């Protein structure tokens, strides 16, 4: 373990992040060229809902894990915050689309 350096790990993480960025860009280009404007709009909307869901899951699960490890009971707060966040994202997206 002592032979693994932080800079080496950082460069690997940077390199894989750049590779993901390039492949993501190529994927979006291919999807954009094969879908119509309306279909791409629907695809973007669905993808944004998925991204909000996954991001909130990472944040809330990290927070609940820390609070539980410290001995605090935060399960109810986590459930309420998840429900509120999903509700807010749903209202925000519906309002945003209805006024375009």
Image (cartoon, helix red, strand yellow):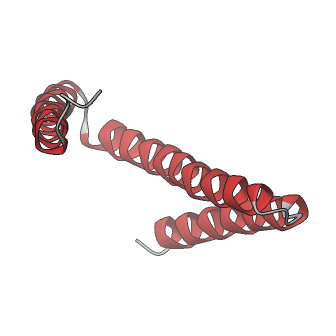
Q: Nearer the viewer, residue 37 or 80?
A: 80
Q: Residue at x 65, y 70 (%)?
A: 88
Q: Nearer the viewer, residue 32 or 38?
A: 32
Q: Is residue 41 left or right of residue 18?
A: right
Is residue 24 positioned above or below 59 on the image?
A: above
Q: Nearer the viewer, residue 84 or 45?
A: 84
Count of all numbered marks drawn on residues in the image: 0
What percent of the width, then of the height, locates residue 63?
65, 61
Q: Residue at x 13, y 36 (%)?
A: 25
What percent of the width, then of the height, locates residue 61?
66, 51
Q: Residue at x 79, y 57 (%)?
A: 68
Q: Is residue 32 left or right of residue 73?
A: left
Q: Quadrant of the N terminus?
A: top left
| Residue 86 placement: quadrant | bottom right
Is residue 2 positioned above or below 60 on the image?
A: above
What percent of the width, then of the height, locates residue 46?
48, 43
Is residue 39 positioned above or below 85 on the image?
A: above
What percent of the width, then of the height, locates residue 17?
18, 38
Q: Quadrant of the C terminus?
A: bottom left
| Residue 59 placement: quadrant | bottom right
Q: Residue at x 83, y 66 (%)?
A: 80
Is residue 78 positioned above or below 3 on the image?
A: below
């Amino acid at each position: 373990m002592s032979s693994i350096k932080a800079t080496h790990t950082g460069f690997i993480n940077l390199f894989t992040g750049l590779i993901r960025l390039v492949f993501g860009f190529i994927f979006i280009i291919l999807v954009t060229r094969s879908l119509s404007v309306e279909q791409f709009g629907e695809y973007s909307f669905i993808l944004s809902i998925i991204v909000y869901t996954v991001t909130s899951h990472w944040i809330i699960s990290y927070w609940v894990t820390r609070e539980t490890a410290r001995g605090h009971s935060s399960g109810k707060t986590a459930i309420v915050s998840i429900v509120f966040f999903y509700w807010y994202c749903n209202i925000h997206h519906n309002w945003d689309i209805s006024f375009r």
